[in-house]
Image: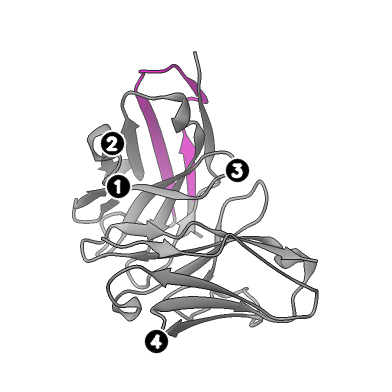
Amino acid sequence: QITLKESGPTLVKPTQTLTLTCTFSGFSLSTGGVGVGWIRQPPGKALEWLAVIYWDGDKRYSPSLNNRLTITKDTSKNQVVLTMTNMDPVDTATYYCAHRPGRKWTLFWGQGTLVTVSS
Amino acid sequence: NFMLTQPLSVSESPGKTVTISCTRSNGRIDSKFVQWYQQRPASAPTTVIYEDNQRPSGVPDRFAGSIDYSSNSASLTVSGLRTEDEADYYCQSYDNTNSWVFGGGTKLTVL
């Protein structure tokens, strides 16, 4: 059974750096083709893809947020970490991590975590 | 890169059939797989269609995905509409660098 769970602060101040952790089970990020990505959703708005990291260490970022994002993986801990710098109230959103299996193109989603940016 | 454009909303009556489109801005729609996700209020998205037209186990066959080459779009068709189908639906694909792309979402209302 594949599970993913996001964790991190629920409240951050403007200009601070957000660090979110995705802890997963049921698959290995060392298996060929596998990826774990981050997607966010501001309240009442659409999904927005942020970043993805693949089994071989390849990383891709949203062009609009590229200079603020860093994604890393710890295969031994079954974790993927996303950092986003210079947080702003417009970054208030539910942040999801999602798993792309290697064998087929689909996504398995975590439950999401709401992050509010406010002073 | 490319964009995926969806209608903001669609509505239909219970028992009827509705189709949601997802148009790719540039590049061929069939060059990369398209997925569809259902998101009910206050819930995480779940996959209803993957790889253009494949249904995950547990998704009823009332949900079908297709590709229309003439309009460069993918479509999600839901037949025999039920009130439980009322949700937001998002299409998603990826580019040559394996970056992910999401459509803007469509709100399905079952009247």
Asked whether the residues under marks 3 and 1 belong to the same chain, the reply is yes
Query: Label 1's element?
Result: loop
Residue at coordinates 40% horizontally, 33% vertically from top-left? Answer: A20
Image quarter where the C terminus of chain B lies is: bottom right
| Residue type (three-letter) at the residue carrying disc 4 | Ser
Q: Residues within 10 Å of mark 4 (few under 14, many from 20)?
A: few
Is the residue at mark 3 from the same chain as the one at mark 2? yes
Q: Nearer the viewer, residue B11 or B84?
A: B11
Asked whether the beta carbons under mark 3 and mark 2 sit within 8 Å of each other, the answer is: no
Q: Quadrant of residue A84?
A: top left
Chain letter for mark 4, please.
Answer: B
* Residue at image location 29% in from the left, 70% down from the top: B26
Q: Which SS class for mark 4?
A: loop
Residue bearing mark 1: A62
- Same chain for mark 4 and mark 1? The answer is no
Circle 3: element type = loop
The quarter of the rendered structure image containing the N terminus of chain B is bottom left
| The furthest residue to the top | A119
